[in-house]
Amino acid sequence: MSLQSEERTDDLVVLLDEDGTPSGTAPRADVHTRDTPLHLAFSCHLLDPDGRMLMTRRALSKRTWPGVWTNSFCGHPRPGEEMADAVVRYGRHELGVEVTGVRLLLPDFRYRAVDAGGIVENELCPVFVARTVQVPQPNPDEVAELSWADPEDVWTIVRRAPWALSPWFVDQARALRNADSLPG
């Protein structure tokens, strides 16, 4: 792919009809508003060799949920990009790590949430798990802090303090815990 065509699709998101069928594209910067259309995204929960989950705190400069603790990383696949390739690409971009063993856990996860500033997230957001053996080097535009946590500690936080976490992470964690999809 040439640099020019890379630039044309680099920041586009895939828009979806209500049934999840792709219906077009739009610039990412224009999509997350007070009237966000349904679009395609993903979430990834990263595990280390000891089975700990990586929790990240969103950068304070993020447009939605700045400074909130959440899953390892999220992103948007480019038009025509395989979802697993997008997970690998975002692992490098947000955390500076190579991810392996990308596995789909919740293929139909969908959520809509409104942050304190009124910005809406409205995503069909398949949830993945992956592994890394590398020490994360977070991109400061994406991640303010990070912490490796035992999954049981994560489930406890979700149960006791859901208000301290991103709404999508709380819903994902509950679904993953109920499905016994992650260790712990």
Image: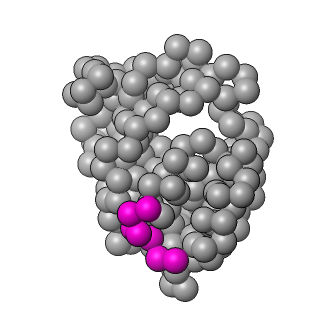
Image position of 132 with respect to 108: above or below: below
Question: What residue do we see at 39% from left, 58% from top?
Answer: 128
Image position of 83 with respect to 20: above or below: below
Question: What residue do we see at 40% from left, 24% from top?
Answer: 38
Q: Is residue 181 rendered magenta in the image?
A: yes
Image position of 53 with respect to 168: above or below: below
Q: Please, what is the dominant secondary structure of the magenta stretch?
A: loop
Q: Is residue 164 left or right of residue 6?
A: right
Q: Position of residue 87 (x, y in %)?
A: 40, 55
Query: Is residue 135 among the parts visible in the rendering?
Result: no
Query: Which residue appears farthest toward the bottom when viewing the image?
Result: 50
Residue nearest the viewer, comparing 118 with 131 = 118
Image position of 18 with respect to 171: above or below: above
Q: Is residue 5 left or right of residue 137?
A: left
Residue nearest the viewer, comparing 150 with 7 = 150
Q: Is residue 90 rendered magenta in the image?
A: no
Magenta residues, start to end: 178-184
Question: What residue do we see at 57% from left, 58% from top?
Answer: 72
Q: How many marks?
A: 0
Name the colour scheme: one colour
Question: What residue do we see at 58% from left, 72% from top?
Answer: 151
For the N terminus, the quadrant is: top left
Q: Position of residue 47 (x, y in %)?
A: 51, 73
Query: Is residue 77 among the parts visible in the rendering?
Result: yes
Q: Position of residue 108 (x, y in %)?
A: 31, 44
Residue nearest the viewer, comparing 178 with 55 = 178
Q: Position of residue 184 (x, y in %)?
A: 52, 77
Residue nearest the viewer, comparing 163 with 50 = 163
